[in-house]
Amino acid sequence: MPEPDPVPALTIGWVTWHIGYWWTATLRHCFQDPAPSERAEVFWPGTAEGAVDWLRGLHRQWRARLGDLTDTELDSTDRTVTLPWGEGMSLADVAGRVNVELTKNVAEIGLLRILHGARDASR
């Protein structure tokens, strides 16, 4: 999925929304409604605590959905066919990509926290 144009300033709020959007859209495509999730349909909860709760809920859903599948279902492309970026990918491959994306986003949050702390320390 293309990034918004222009790309918003990189903030912890935006990155947590991005994680939530990505996970919501992937869950929807692979396990629920195959209609694409529009960015405007996915709202950031408004607080850090709300974002943590939201992302933990998505994590629980993702683990529960994957945990119920057989190896054959994980190796299948049936659930990933509507993903705009998942053409030809098995669900296991998509799960791996979700983990890589999540790892990248968490690293971005960590860097933003370090930069914020460094800015405060220099004042």
Image (spheres, rainbow, N blue to C red):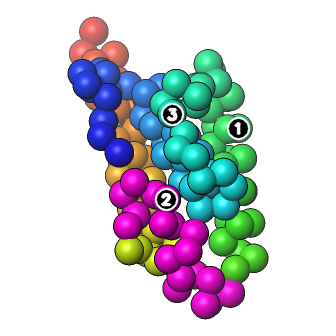
Residue that mark 1 sits on: 53
The spot of residue 70 in percent (x, y) is: 68, 87
Query: Given the image, on which type of amino acid does mark 3 rest?
Result: Glu
Question: Which is closer to the viewer, label 2 or label 1?
Answer: 2
Residue under the point 62% across and 83% down: 73
Q: Return the disc, 2 or 1, that comes first in the chain's sequence.
A: 1
Q: In this figure, which residue is indicated by the disc labeled 3? A: 38
Q: Is 69 positioned to the left or the right of 90 in the image?
A: right
Q: Secondary structure at mark 3?
A: loop
Image coordinates for residue 24, horizontal then vertical, percent: 59, 45
Give the mark nearer the N terminus: 1 vs 3.
3
Does residue 84 belong to the magenta stretch?
yes
Q: Amino acid at mark 1?
A: Asp
Res 29 → quadrant: bottom right
Q: Which mark is residue 95?
A: none
Q: Is residue 45 magenta?
A: no
Magenta-highlighted residues: 70-87
Q: Which corner quadrant of the image does residue 60 belong to?
A: bottom right
Q: Residue at 30% x, 36% y: name it.
A: 3
Q: Residue furthest top?
A: 123
Can residue 103 be seen at all in this image of the molecule?
Answer: no
Q: Residues within 10 Å of mark 2 (few under 14, many from 20)?
A: some
Circle 1 SS class = helix
Q: Residue at x 35, y 52 (%)?
A: 104
The answer to which of 13 and 39 lies nearer the viewer is 39
Residue at the disc numbered 2:
82
